[in-house]
Amino acid sequence: MSIGHRLVRHCTRTATANRIPVPRAPTVSLLLLGDYQHMKYLLLIYGSEKAMASATPDAMSRMHSAYGAYTTALRESGVYVAGEALQPTATATSIRGAGAGANVLDGPFAETKEQLGGFYMLDVPDLDAAIKWARRCPGTDGGTVEVRPVMIIPG
């Protein structure tokens, strides 16, 4: 039995004995690497598309340079799993409903002040490490970076 399974089993037994509700699955993805565990987190980068559209070419160049340096730092540290920038929300397609009767709609589903502009997936030891990287993300300059653990789906 892996360390992760033993930890979940121990926590489940302790919680059950103390009559604390136990979720059916852990809420974070654990990767067992060597003698320590890593967790996957998404850094979801939100910003204003209006501000981006009105940015000067010089400002855009500085932003691209900042993201390039940040991505290089993530890769060199070994925590980078994936990352992509997204096209503007005007290019989005939303699906409402299920099956053959689903409606296909142009554009985003919700109107918001900030839009999801990209993401990074990191493989780090814990939430504190993910927050440390999120604070360094260029997206925090004028936007929001949401840190969210990746859920493990058993099976």
Image (cartoon, rainbow, N blue to C red):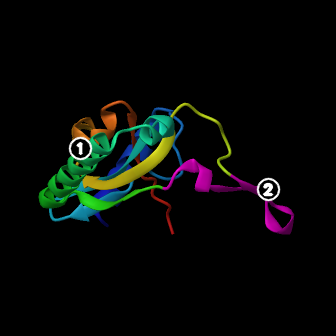
In the rendered view of the protein, which quadrant contains the N terminus? bottom left
Q: Is residue 57 left or right of residue 34?
A: right
Q: Nearer the viewer, residue 24 or 104?
A: 104
Q: Nearer the viewer, residue 26 or 72?
A: 72
- Name the residue rendered at 29%, 40% in the picture: 59
Q: Position of residue 36 (x, y in %)?
A: 18, 56
Q: Which element is circle 2 on? A: loop
Q: Is residue 7 above or below residue 17?
A: below
Q: Position of residue 68 (x, y in %)?
A: 22, 54
- Name the residue rendered at 20%, 64% in the picture: 33
Q: Position of residue 149 (x, y in %)?
A: 40, 47
Q: Is residue 41 left or right of residue 80?
A: right
Q: Is residue 37 above or below residue 131?
A: below
Q: Nearer the viewer, mark 1 or mark 2?
A: 1
- Name the residue rendered at 61%, 55% in the picture: 92
Where is residue 112, by image quadrant?
top right
Q: Which mark is residue 62?
A: 1
| Amino acid type, mark 2 | Gly
* Residue 130 visible (yes or no): no
Number of numbered callouts drawn: 2
Q: Which element is circle 1 on? A: helix
| Amino acid type, mark 1 | Arg
* Residue 19 visible (yes or no): yes
Q: Which mark is residue 97?
A: 2
* Residues drawn in magenta: 87-106
Q: Is residue 49 left or right of residue 45?
A: right
- Name the residue rendered at 42%, 52% in the picture: 150
Contact? badges 1 and 2 (CB < 8 Å): no
As for residue 100 lying within the magenta part, the answer is yes
Q: Position of residue 120 (x, y in %)?
A: 34, 53
- Structural crowding at the residue carrying mark 2, measured as other residues with C-alpha within 10 Å and reported as few (<14), some (14–19) or many (≥20): few
Gap between marks 1 and 2 measured at Cα? 41 Å
